[in-house]
Image (cartoon, rainbow, N blue to C red):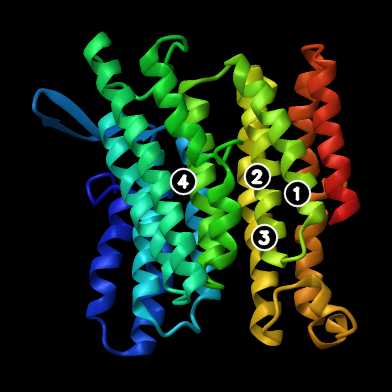
């Protein structure tokens, strides 16, 4: 199975072939078939390094397979399938094509074994994702998408500059641990935390995600910020500044979510808050915290996709986004299944016992307690309490 193709290329090939299919039913089957093929591909990939190509004296590695990359690879493919099921009603082929490119580039980042390959897929991810915003085809979406791509161009430039300096200084293109301290590492970290929506580089997320198409927002919530968490886990574990950025991020996001009236913007701020736990876990750098960050990323992708699908269903049925406009509509009677599924996502993000968010979030908080970091412990608890009370 290793000889067929990297998982990323399955989705990229799908993006190329999808517009060629004229029959809608055939396209729908194809949309579901591609994630299934990718999932089977992952099942049969043993650990190791694959698809290595020499380019200008550097090894380009398209397949570094280990436990961490497989964890993110599996959840990316799972949410790709779920998102495609949710998007079956969409007739616009361009949206599905952009989604396939976006998913494929996120998988390319996940399995990249060198920083050049990482950078190429990183930029494809930025370009393809903006079309999921622009396909909403209104002025707010066009403006938000333009601001979104401008921020990511800046982040991409910072990342490229850091990579060039890093390779010049070390001669290595290995995508792994980077010692934090010099200009190269600082630029690379800047490029990563912009995609993670770490304040003050967070506004693109709360600005753009609510303006995306109803189905596009489901994909957006899964890949960009979680790919950033993945690369931080690879490159900057134990960096102190990430502890504080993550803890502040967790509180900041939930504080703005409490004040928000737009249902999808509220969920966007919750993304910022929850990614804060992951970033803090990376910064703490212990086995418990790193596993907690990975677990929380996995869980967050699932329950946040569920929440955005529920919000999208409400918007689709009512045509309204403001929570104040939804009062008195008895939606729990009209949409009981949507309510039930949304509550599962709500319980998970609130870390209610027996739901997945409880386990993953507790791992990060417990790691801060083990390291005797009382301020970080209190900030993370405060954010968790705010999420529970508000959600």
Q: Earlier in the sequence, mark 3 or mark 1?
A: 1
Task: Say which of marks 4 and 2 sits in front.
Answer: 2
**Precedes in sequence: disc 4 or disc 2:** 4
Q: Position of residue 270 (x, y in %)?
A: 71, 50
Secondary-structure class at tag 3:
helix
Give the x, y percent position of residue 385.
89, 42
Mark 3 and mark 4 lie on one chain; the one further toward the N terminus is: 4
Dot placed on the residue nearer the N-terminal end, 3 or 2: 3
Q: Quadrant of residue 240?
A: top right
Q: Nearer the viewer, residue 355 or 308?
A: 308
Instruction: Please tell me which of labels 1 and 4 falls first in the chain.
Output: 4
Q: Are marks 2 and 1 in contact (CB under 8 Å)?
A: yes
Q: Secondary structure at mark 2?
A: helix
Q: Residues within 10 Å of mark 3 (few under 14, many from 20)?
A: many
Q: What residue sits right under mark 2 in the picture?
A: 272
Q: Residue 245, percent across and down?
A: 65, 27
| Contact (Cβ within 8 Å) of mark 3 with mark 4 | no
Mark 2, other Cα within 10 Å: few <14 / some 14–19 / many ≥20: many
Q: Label for residue 73?
A: 4
Gap in angstroms between the C-alphas marked 4 and 2: 22 Å
Query: Quadrant where the C terminus lies?
Result: bottom right
**Identity of the residue drawn at 68% across and 51% down:** 269
- What is the CA distance from the residue labelled 3 to the residue labelled 4? 27 Å
335 left or right of 133 in image: right
Q: Which residue is mark 3?
A: 265
Q: CA distance from mark 3 to mark 2?
A: 11 Å
Alpha-carbon span between mark 3 and mark 1 = 9 Å
Tag 1 residue: 256
Depth check, front residue: 106 or 67? 106
* Viewer-side residue, 19 vs 77: 19
Does 116 sit above or below residue 72?
above
């Amino acid at each position: 199975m290793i000889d067929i193709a990297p998982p990323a290329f399955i989705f990229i090939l799908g993006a190329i072939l999808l517009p060629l299919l004229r029959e809608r039913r055939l396209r729908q089957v194809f949309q579901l078939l591609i994630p299934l093929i990718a999932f089977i591909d992952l099942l049969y990939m043993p650990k190791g390094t694959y698809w290595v190509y020499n380019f200008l004296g550097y090894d380009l590695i398209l397949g570094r397979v280990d436990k961490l990359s497989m964890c993110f690879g599996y959840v990316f493919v799972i949410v790709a399938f779920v998102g495609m099921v949710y998007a079956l009603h969409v007739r616009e082929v361009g949206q599905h094509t952009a989604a396939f490119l976006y998913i494929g580039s996120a998988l390319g980042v996940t399995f990249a074994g060198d920083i050049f390959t990482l950078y190429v897929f990183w930029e494809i991810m930025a370009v393809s994702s903006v079309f999921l915003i622009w396909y909403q085809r209104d002025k707010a979406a066009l403006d938000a998408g333009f601001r979104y791509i401008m921020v990511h161009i800046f982040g991409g430039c910072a990342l490229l500059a850091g990579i060039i300096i890093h390779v010049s200084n070390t001669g290595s293109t290995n995508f792994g641990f980077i010692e934090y301290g010099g200009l190269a590492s600082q630029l690379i970290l800047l490029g990563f935390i912009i995609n993670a929506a770490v304040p003050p580089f967070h506004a693109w997320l709360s600005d753009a995600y609510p303006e995306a198409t109803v189905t596009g927002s489901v994909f957006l919530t899964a890949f960009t910020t979680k790919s950033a968490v993945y690369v931080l886990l690879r490159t900057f574990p134990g960096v102190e500044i990430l502890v504080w950025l993550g803890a502040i991020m967790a509180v900041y996001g939930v504080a703005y979510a409490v004040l928000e009236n737009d249902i999808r913007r509220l969920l966007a701020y919750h993304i910022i808050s929850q990614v804060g736990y992951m970033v803090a876990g990376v910064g703490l750098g212990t086995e418990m915290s790193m596993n907690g960050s990975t677990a929380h990323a996995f869980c967050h992708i699932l329950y946040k996709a569920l929440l955005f699908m529920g919000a999208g269903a409400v918007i689709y049925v009512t045509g309204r986004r403001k929570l104040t406009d939804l009062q008195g509509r008895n939606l729990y009677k009209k949409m009981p299944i949507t309510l039930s599924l949304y509550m599962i996502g709500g319980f998970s993000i609130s870390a209610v016992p027996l739901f997945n968010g409880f386990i993953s979030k507790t791992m990060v908080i417990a790691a801060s307690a083990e390291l005797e970091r009382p301020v970080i412990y209190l900030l993370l608890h405060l954010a968790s309490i705010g999420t529970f009370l508000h959600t």
